[in-house]
Image (tube, rainbow, N blue to C red):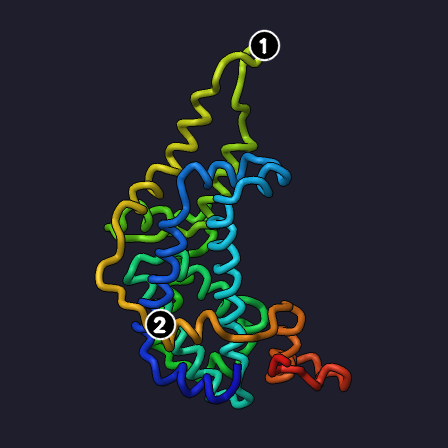
Amino acid sequence: MNKFRYHIFMGISGDDFADELTRIDWIMFSSIRIRDFVRHVSLSAAQKDKCKSLQNVNRMISHFNHIAKWVANMILLRDKAKHRAQMLEKFMNIALGLRRLNNYNGLAAVLAGINGTAIHRLAQTRALVPADVQKRFARLVILMGTQKSHFAYRLAWENSPLPRIPFIPLHRRDLVSAEEGSKTFVGPNDDRINWKKFEVLGEVLLPIMKSQGTAYPNLAKHETARDLILGCRMPTDDEEIYQRSLQLESSASGPIEPSKKKFPWFAK
C-alpha cells in the first residue's frame, strides 16, 4: 500500500469497485451451502474443525473484516487532509453503489471501515467531503443502523428484488439466537422434536436460500480493482490503525506522545 496505489485507486470509478466487491462477495456467498450456516452455529469447535465445508462461511466472515480494515487503511494512507477527504468521498460513493446492487454484506463492511473509531474521529477530513455526499451517505448509515434490531435493514432486505446478498453477520447472529434460545428436543424424556425452533431457523434461512438461486448478471472481472481490494499488504491491528489516525489528526486533548509519532506505515 503506497502513494502509487492511491493514484491507481482514484483512477478507477466507484461503480467499478462496487461491481468488483459484489462479484467477490457473490462468489463467496453462493459457495456456502444452507446447511453450513446451521452447522456454523450449532457444532462444537472440535466438530467445526472436522467440517471442511465450513471454510466457506469462515472465508466470507474473514473477507468482511478484511474489507473494513482495507477501507480504513486506504483513507489513512495520505498525510494531507484533502487527499484523505477524496478517498473518504470515494468510499462513500462506493457504498452507494453497493446499495444499488443490493449487496448488503459489502455495504456493511465498507460502513464498518468508515464508521470505525480510527476514521470516524477524523473531523478535519470529514469537513472537506461535500455536504451532498455526506447526506446521501447518512441515509446508508441509518439503513444499516442497529436501531430496533436492525429494523430498517430487515425491511429493505425483505423488499429487495433479486439478485441480492444479505448482511451475513446479522443473519448469523439470528441463527445463534435461535440455536441457543431453545432446545432441539423437548418433552419429559427429551424425545420430541421442537418444531418451533426449526420454524424460526427456516424464517432466517429461506430468504437466504432464495437469494442464492439468482446470480448477478454482467458482473465482469476487474483485475486492477481486484488486486487493490485483495492484494494490499497493510496493518491489520486495530491499535496500529488507530495510532495512524492519531498521527494524522491529533485529539483535542493535546499533542501526540513522542513515542507514538513514528508509524511503521508501509509494511515490510
Q: Residues within 10 Å of mark 2 (few under 14, many from 20)?
A: many
Please determine whether, in this image, residue 83 is positioned above or below residue 194.
below
Mark 2–mark 1 distance (CA, rounded to whole Å): 56 Å
The location of residue 9, given as percent across then percent down, is: 40, 81
Type of amino acid at the residue the image marks with label 2: Phe
Q: Residue at the spot x=56%, y=32% of the render? A: 180
Q: Which residue is mark 1?
A: 189
Mark 1, residues whose alpha carbon is within 10 Å: few (<14), some, or many (≥20)? Answer: few
User: For this view, does 73 lie left or right of residue 257?
Assistant: left
Which corner quadrant holds the C terminus?
bottom right
User: Vertically, is 80 above or below 75?
Assistant: below
Image spot of residue 229 (x, y percent):
44, 71
- Please tell me the numbered disc located at residue 112: none
Q: How many marks?
A: 2
Q: Amino acid at mark 1?
A: Asn
Q: Is residue 147 above or below residue 195?
A: below
- Residue at 38%, 84% (x, y): give it: 10
Disc 1 secondary structure class: loop
Q: Nearer the viewer, residue 47 or 124?
A: 47
Earlier along the polypeptide chain: callout 2 or callout 1?
A: 2
Q: Residue at x 51, y 75 (%)?
A: 232
